[in-house]
Image (cartoon, rainbow, N blue to C red):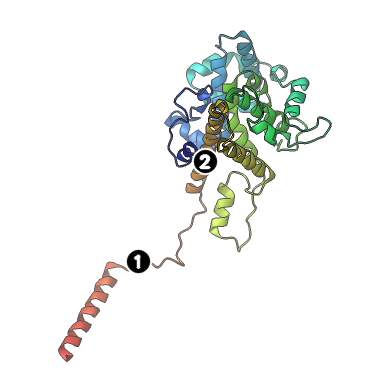
Amino acid sequence: SRVVASRCLGAMKKVLQEPNPTSQSNEPYVDSEAHMKVYFDNPLLAIKTKILSMLGQFLQSDCAETSLIAMKTAKALLATSDGKRSWKSLDDDVKGMLNPFVNANESSLKKEAVLISNRSLLRLKDKSGVPLDIDDDTWCWKEAIWTFRDRDNSSCNSWIQLVVCSIISCCYSKDSTYNQEDESPGFFRMCAGLCAKEASFAACIFPGVIYHLLDSEDRYHVNGKNDSVRDVILARTAIGSPTSKINAEITKCFSLLLRTISQDSLSSQNLRPVSQALSLALNTLELLKSLTEHRFLTSPDHVKNTSIIPKAASTKTRRSRNAEAASSGVECASNT
């Protein structure tokens, strides 16, 4: 609990001294001042740029299967308009590595993405505890997916792969009831194959899907004359609606992680992977917090409060008041 508290209070110390197997994903989405403006103005673009950057690393993997999946994923992503925009924001070395995939035939390359097979999808849904014959579009938020209980040899790697592949399969499928208006669902869906293969890539995807699911929900509409400035600003700066269905589901799942690590019955064997999973969740919360702060501080809806806070008295007025007080004191003394 002390580790959790220190992270929540901003102490950026590692949960454990040993290296995190998914530590590669904990690198910031913005690593230079040049990318800072893109990060705040268009968070999804920064997230997708980070994803493409990691694809460049996996293209050079010693594992032939990983390299092949990364190549097919890169081809599919760079065939989308979002992928092309993200590619332009990459560093020159990574941009050059991915350049051969940019100007290819779009319609054919999108089909090359390695997706979650129907058999794997049934296996994921089975792990959630939801009967396979029940049509449930919330199975990826079930407790069995998000906790480490009753699992032999659990690890943070297997946990993040299970969580991210479940979210993509459940929320970004073509039949999903979640937001499908932009390209992001298709973009993240094309990443599912490499997420199932490489845990660090799944950990990189995790903050992106959480942010997108929250921010794509409908926000409060505050157009009435009686709405306060505070309500207007919060409605426009909040990431999603605090009362939305997806917000409630994600809050529940993050709370499960906090409760899991505080349980006395948690074995020492499971303490390390749970701590690493909690670290990923807290990193995501820090991302959401920084974006919300930026939106709030840069909001054009702020107005100066002139009705409650009194105006400061000018120097001339203060001197006049002091002179009157002094003369009154002299008169009182002379009368005495």
Most foreground residue, 318 or 230 = 230
Residue found farthest to the front:
265
Taking the spot 64% from the left edge, 43% from the top edge, the residue there is 247
What residue is pinned by disc 2? 291
- Which numbered dot is residue 186? none
Q: Is residue 21 above or below residue 235?
A: above
Q: Secondary structure at mark 2?
A: helix
Most foreground residue, 62 or 330 = 62
Of marks 1 and 2, the one in the foreground: 2
Taking the spot 43% from the left edge, 34% from the top edge, the residue there is 12
Quadrant location of the C terminus in the rendered image: bottom left
Residue found farthest to the bottom:
335
Residue 143 seen anywhere in this rendered image of the structure: yes
First of labels 1, 2 by sequence position: 2
Q: Is residue 38 left or right of residue 325?
A: right
Taking the spot 54% from the left edge, 14% from the top edge, the residue there is 97
What residue is pinned by disc 1? 312
